[in-house]
Image: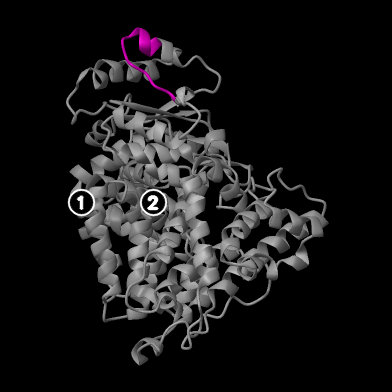
């Protein structure tokens, strides 16, 4: 394909040309210089445990406002939710694995377009016309209420289970009937009492969709899901409804809002958030007026499901940096609310430390700075904080978390007396549903590095520990919950990620984390605070050592570059210039889980 592009006169750079050295800068410089960016996405490139480069490059190209970004999916598999959201507004190509790509006429046509137009000085505002996707034309024909409802349900819930999509489409059909057009007598008579497999296929075919068996991205088990036959159809359909069909859009948004808060349809939360994310990229200000201003209004009351959806909407909208001021304004409005203050602050934490914080960590840092130690002053806020995407992981033992009950001065009585229920549900009832979405390792590592920079920043005025308590506590809470080893069933950030791919490709990021550990080791506790950062740091390291010991005792294998030994040796070397007593903090609470040779290796620095 590259040879073909070059014979057509295009200058082509691909990552096979990377020279050993500053890997990241070379790729970013190439994207900066290019007129068009083609991203090939294979199942292996986005599998759990991958480095996240595909999503990172696409995000960087979008941030750079490249007008021609063409993601091509090679093979038949489900994309991770975060990547699916990222490319939902882009025209996409679909290629068979192992095929000759240039024999695919649609793909070749798009490549020719990029060469002829994008690479020959085309207008920056030009965009490729989706190949074979004409949802606007489809809507202009006299369609049945059933077909319109099913088409929009598939657009909203694409890749959800087939039977669930067909069932829930009936509620949108009923909403259309009430608000827009009642069923004709013929349509009513045509309503099937039961839907056979053949009937399902026929109904889906009428809306350019299909039922297909695909493996679940995490369990590997095949499931019957619904998708459009053309990858570009979904975006075209949603765009047309948002921009051209005001009445349909109004009913559709009301239906989505109701679907989110129904207990029997809560499973659709991520799909709905993806759809609203598509609208956010089309018209974020319009979505604010129609959705966010209502769902995030403390005066009306806040619902957990709406808040989680808003978290995804803002994360997608943040891909366009021009939306940043509006996103920050929404969060400040929550933090400044005088009504339902605790609920509003919970909502701000859920949004800021969710996928938005992992894409734009500086926004998350600003929210944490505004809350400061109030985050830890109330059990309801602390519980939400520990369950956000940026922090949450399974606790590794039954020991209680480090004591933060007196991290700050007493909070105002009206805040302390507010209900712990927060967002219309008590934390006990929402616990199982406030789960993090899957996020790739690198954004999570960058979030931790931002916390580390905050903890390491020069402090003026108040004593250093007071200023550093919030970022240090947040960092070590995350490290406490971080798995030691990478798993095929999860792409959560692990210590193995930090000490292997990330350490090799972005050593500066690891150095930033190490500096925060040094700050914790040197911090002097204050009389008015029971929070001791070095104990929190030691607890995180103890849990890594304990997890490693359990793996070893159960006969499990550790990587050649042992994550715990490598990181502990790094810390020991960084602490040593401040004296033997400071260096000893690395091993003080972990030595019970270590062999003598492990301790000797850490002290000698051999794992490095």
Q: Is residue 289 above or below residue 428?
A: above
Q: Is residue 220 left or right of residue 163?
A: right
The mark that comes first in sequence, 2 or 1, is 1
Counting from the top left corner in percent of width and height, residue 85 is at 39, 45
Residue depicted at x 35% and y 18%: 111
Q: Evaluate whether residue 45 shows in this view.
A: yes
Q: Is residue 190 visible?
A: no
Q: Is residue 203 left or right of residue 219?
A: left
Decide which of 221, 503 is in the foreground and name it.
503
Q: Which residues are magenta?
A: 4-14
Residue 567: quadrant of the picture: bottom right
- Left or right position of 318 against 567: left
Question: How far across and how far down the image is residue 34, in percent?
Answer: 31, 26
Q: Is residue 229 left or right of residue 341?
A: right
**Residue extending furthest toward the top:** 7
- Who's the residue at 29% across and 16% down the image? 115
Q: Any magenta on residue 5?
A: yes
Residue at (39, 74) in percent of width and height: 467
Q: Dominant secondary structure of the magenta stretch? A: loop
Which quadrant is the N terminus positioned in? top left
- Element on which disc 2 rests: helix
Closer to the camera in the image, 553 or 340: 553
Name the image quarter holding residue 537.
bottom right
Q: Position of residue 230 (x, y in %)?
A: 39, 30
The disc placed on residue 359 is: 2
Q: CA distance from mark 2 to mark 1?
A: 34 Å
Please tell me whether residue 151 belongs to the stretch shown in magenta. no
Number of the label disc, if any, that sits on residue 247 = 1
Mark 2 is surrounded, within 10 Å at the Cα level, by few (under 14), some (14 to 19) or many (20 or more) other residues, namely many
Towards the viewer: 311 or 247: 311
Question: Residue 391: x and y, percent?
Answer: 50, 63
Which residue ends up furthest to the bottom in the rendered image? 413
């Amino acid at each position: 394909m590259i040879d073909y592009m070059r014979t057509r006169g295009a200058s082509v750079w691909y990552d096979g040309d990377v020279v050993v050295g500053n890997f990241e800068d070379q790729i970013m410089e190439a994207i900066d210089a290019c007129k068009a960016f083609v991203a090939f996405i294979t199942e292996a490139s986005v599998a759990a445990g991958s480095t996240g480069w595909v999503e990172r490059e696409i995000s960087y190209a979008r941030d750079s406002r490249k007008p021609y970004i063409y993601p091509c999916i090679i093979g038949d598999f489900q994309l991770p939710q975060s990547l699916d959201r990222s490319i939902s507004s882009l025209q996409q190509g679909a290629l068979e694995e192992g095929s000759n790509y240039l024999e695919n006429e649609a793909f070749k046509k798009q490549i020719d377009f990029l060469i002829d137009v994008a690479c020959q000085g085309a207008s920056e505002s030009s965009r490729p016309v989706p190949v074979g996707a004409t949802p606007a034309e489809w809507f202009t024909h006299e369609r049945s209420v059933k077909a319109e409802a099913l088409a929009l349900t598939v657009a909203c819930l694409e890749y959800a289970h087939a039977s669930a999509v067909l069932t829930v489409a009936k509620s949108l059909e009923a909403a259309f009937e009430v608000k827009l057009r009642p069923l004709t007598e013929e349509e009513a008579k045509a309503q099937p009492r039961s839907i056979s497999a053949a009937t399902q296929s026929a109904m889906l075919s009428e809306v350019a969709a299909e039922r297909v068996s695909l493996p679940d991205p995490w369990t590997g088990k095949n499931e019957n899901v619904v998708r459009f036959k053309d990858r570009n159809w979904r975006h075209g359909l949603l765009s047309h409804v948002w921009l051209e069909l005001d009445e349909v859009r109004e009913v559709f948004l009301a239906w989505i809002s109701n679907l989110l808060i129904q207990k029997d349809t809560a499973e659709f939360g991520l799909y709905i958030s993806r759809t609203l994310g598509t609208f956010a990229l089309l018209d974020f200000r319009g979505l604010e007026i129609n959705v966010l201003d209502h769902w995030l209004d403390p005066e009306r009351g806040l619902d957990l499901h709406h808040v989680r959806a808003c978290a995804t909407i803002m994360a997608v909208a943040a891909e366009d940096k021009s939306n940043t001021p509006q996103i920050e304004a929404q969060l400040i409005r929550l933090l400044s609310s005088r009504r339902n203050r605790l609920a509003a602050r919970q909502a701000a934490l859920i949004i800021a430390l969710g996928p938005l914080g992992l894409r734009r960590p500086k926004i998350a840092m600003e929210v944490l700075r505004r809350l400061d130690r109030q985050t830890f002053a109330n059990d309801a806020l602390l519980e939400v904080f520990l369950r956000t995407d940026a922090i949450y992981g399974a606790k590794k033992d039954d020991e209680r978390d480090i004591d933060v009950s007196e991290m700050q001065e007493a909070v105002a009585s009206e805040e302390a007396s507010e209900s712990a229920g927060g967002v219309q549900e008590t934390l006990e009832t929402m616990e199982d549903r406030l789960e993090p979405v899957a996020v790739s390792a690198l954004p999570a590592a960058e979030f931790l590095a931002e916390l580390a920079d905050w903890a390491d920043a020069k402090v003026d005025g108040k004593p250093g520990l007071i200023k550093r308590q919030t970022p240090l506590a947040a960092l070590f809470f995350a490290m406490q919950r971080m798995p030691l080893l990478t798993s095929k069933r999860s792409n959560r950030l692990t210590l193995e990620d930090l000490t292997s791919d990330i350490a090799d490709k972005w050593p500066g990021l690891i150095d930033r984390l190490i500096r925060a550990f040094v700050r914790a080791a040197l911090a002097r506790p204050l009389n008015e605070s029971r929070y001791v950062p070095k104990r929190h740091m030691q607890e995180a390291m103890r849990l890594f050592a304990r997890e490693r010991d359990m793996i070893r005792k159960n006969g499990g294998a550790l990587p050649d570059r042992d994550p715990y030994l490598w990181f502990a040796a790094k810390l020991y070397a960084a602490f040593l210039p401040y004296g033997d007593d400071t260096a000893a903090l690395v091993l003080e609470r972990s030595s019970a889980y270590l062999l003598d040779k492990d301790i000797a290796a850490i002290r000698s620095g051999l794992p490095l």
